[in-house]
Amino acid sequence: MSEERIQQMAAALAERVGGEVSRDNNQTVVRVARERIVEAATILRDAFGFQVAEDVTAVDYWQRREPRFDVVYHFFSYEHSDAITLRVAVDDGETMPSITGVFPGANWYERELFDMFGIPCGGHPDLRRIIMPYDWEGHPLRKDYPLGYEEPQFTFNFDEIQARKVQGKR
């Protein structure tokens, strides 16, 4: 893996799709507009030899910034051992274009993105829940998702927790 090669690819990609290159946690990141993600993925595959979309996930910046989410794509080239990250800013309620036409393996990742964050991918061949039950309401990885918190019970707090529980007849 050549850092110089990755920086050159990132700069060329950013120039072609109107993106912005940065370094974050020792990774080369290219910020891309939502409308250009399929084009950027195609360029990575065809022009730079990236063979796989390793992951598609999101970061929720709820109450910290607008747009609320960053959809994060990690791509890898086996031939050159290169890794690059694309980030796309997405607001709540917006639809991401699906990259499954370019990287078919992104199918499962985009389903997880929809299931866990509620970010739909337009043009996806089978966008339905993959982890949560079909009748589940909400998206558990959103920061505004209500937590069903119950304090762990140990010997030192047993009586206190038992006193708070609703006691039914048996």
Image: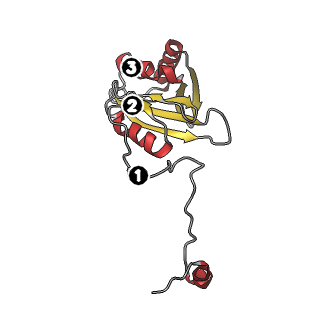
Q: Residue at x 61, y 78 (%)?
A: 164
Q: Earlier in the sequence, mark 2 or mark 3?
A: 3
The three-letter code of the residue at mark 2 reads: Phe
Q: Height in image: 161 above or below 88?
A: below
For residue 56, which quarter of the picture?
top left
**Image quadrant where one finds the C terminus:** bottom left
Q: Position of residue 26 (x, y in %)?
A: 55, 35
Q: Residue at x 40, y 36 (%)?
A: 110
The three-letter code of the residue at mark 3 reads: Thr
**Residue that carries the numbered disc 1 in the rendered image:** 135
Q: Helix, strand or loop at disc 1?
A: loop
Q: Position of residue 47 (x, y in %)?
A: 38, 15
The three-letter code of the residue at mark 1 reads: Asp
* Residues marked 2 and 3 touching at CB (< 8 Å): no
Q: Crowdedness of circle 1 by 10 Å Cα count: few (<14), some, many (20+)?
A: few
- Between the C-alphas of marks 2 and 3, the distance is 13 Å
Q: Is residue 32 visible?
A: no
* Residues marked 3 and 1 touching at CB (< 8 Å): no
Mark 1 or mark 2, whichever is nearer to me? 1
Q: Position of residue 121 (x, y in %)?
A: 43, 32
- Between the C-alphas of marks 1 and 2, the distance is 35 Å
Q: Height in image: 164 above or below 70?
A: below
**Residue that carries the numbered disc 2 in the rendered image:** 76
**Residue that carries the numbered disc 3 in the rendered image:** 42
Q: Residue at x 49, y 86 (%)?
A: 169
